[in-house]
Amino acid sequence: MNQYKNNETKLSFFENLAIKIIKQGPIPKHIAFIMDGNRRWATNFNLNKSEGHEFGSEKLSKILKWCPKIGIKEVTVYAFSIENFKRSQDEVNAIMKLFIRKLLEKEQELHEKGIKVKVIGNLDMLPNDVQKVVADAMLSTKDNSKLNLNIAFAYSSREEITNSIKTIVEGVENNELILEDLDNVLIDECLYTNQSSPVDLLVRTSGEMRFSDFLLWQVPSTVFYFTTSLWPDFTLWHLLAAVFYYQRNYTQAKALKEHYNQTRPAITNNPRVDKFLANLEEKRCTKLVEMNRLIKS
């Protein structure tokens, strides 16, 4: 078990060599992970489900150390879906406590590594203590710029898209927008991921070949890579294999991305939309500040 908890970042000669070789090709700037298999991994070792999630969180810590070495600038992880609230209350409570503990434990490391944290999802569904820690992590790391980490928590793609549409509808009802302003670009800008770069590579572990309601709007030109490895067993070699698969499919992915960009509405100078989006971002920041004040009170 020690090899799963060991966060030593020193790489072997062959690992460093493999990284140098893989960096000769195109590198995905934004990689997303569906971190599946924690519970099955725990079962294989006769451990509690909560211990599986614990080891899974340690794997994420390693991923965040490997990605910058490869040249990856942004990481999005599917940590907890809205559907996961249907699990046993004991398991949900254990995940919430683990999430709080890890964000608090890693606070200094996040700053040392220059990692900017953004939690995407319906934060209103989270317990108050989780909301507070989330707000603190997002606000305290907002100026970090070496690696962007998006944590999808209390998230589903359908809820995200629905929320984006509702936000636009409210804008129309409040005379901040007109119906003709609605297009793909505006929907993009109202998503939780509005500040993220396009997802270049999406990796799912555990052998499952489905998206589980994750980033459905954001992946029209993304390369998908599925591995049978359970998340706690995911190694640097698995990550390099995923990047190599991306490189093998890079030409097709690039052509698809260019076609997608050509079919998107052109971004025009629309002061009304610009003002609406600026106000939306201000409202989201104000909400975080209000949560953060509760921490300090």
Image: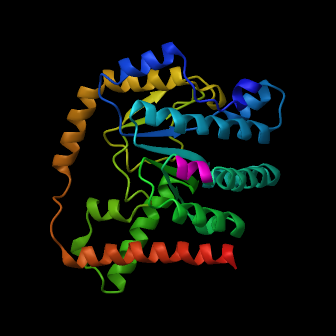
In the rendered image, residue 250, in percent from the top left (x then y), is placed at 28, 27
Residue 11 appears at what percent x and percent y? 54, 22
102 relative to 63 in the view: left or right? right
Which quadrant holds the N terminus? top right
* Magenta-drawn segment: 108-112
Q: Give percent across and percent down for residue 58.
A: 66, 37
Nearer-the-camera pick, 2 or 30: 2
- Residue at the spot 30% in from the left edge and 22% down from the top edge: 24
Q: Can you say whether 143 is above or below 279 in the image?
A: above
Residue 18 inside the magenta-drawn segment: no
Q: Is residue 248 above or below residue 256?
A: above
Q: Is residue 188 left or right of residue 57?
A: left
Front residue of 16/148: it is 16
In the picture, residue 184 is in which quadrant? Answer: bottom left
At horizontal 34% and vertical 49% (from top left) the residue drawn is 197
Task: Report whether 80 appears left or right of 217.
Answer: right
- Tell me if residue 39 comes above or below residue 10 in the rendering: below
206 and 200: which is toward the camera: 200
Find the residue positioned furthest to the bottom. 174
Magenta part mainly helix, strand or loop? helix
- 155 relative to 184 in the view: left or right: right
Q: Position of residue 292 (x, y in %)?
A: 60, 73
Q: How many marks?
A: 0
Q: How is the image coloured?
A: rainbow
Residue drawn 38% across and 22% down? 245
Q: Quadrant of residue 136?
A: bottom right
Which quarter of the image is occupied by the C terminus? bottom right
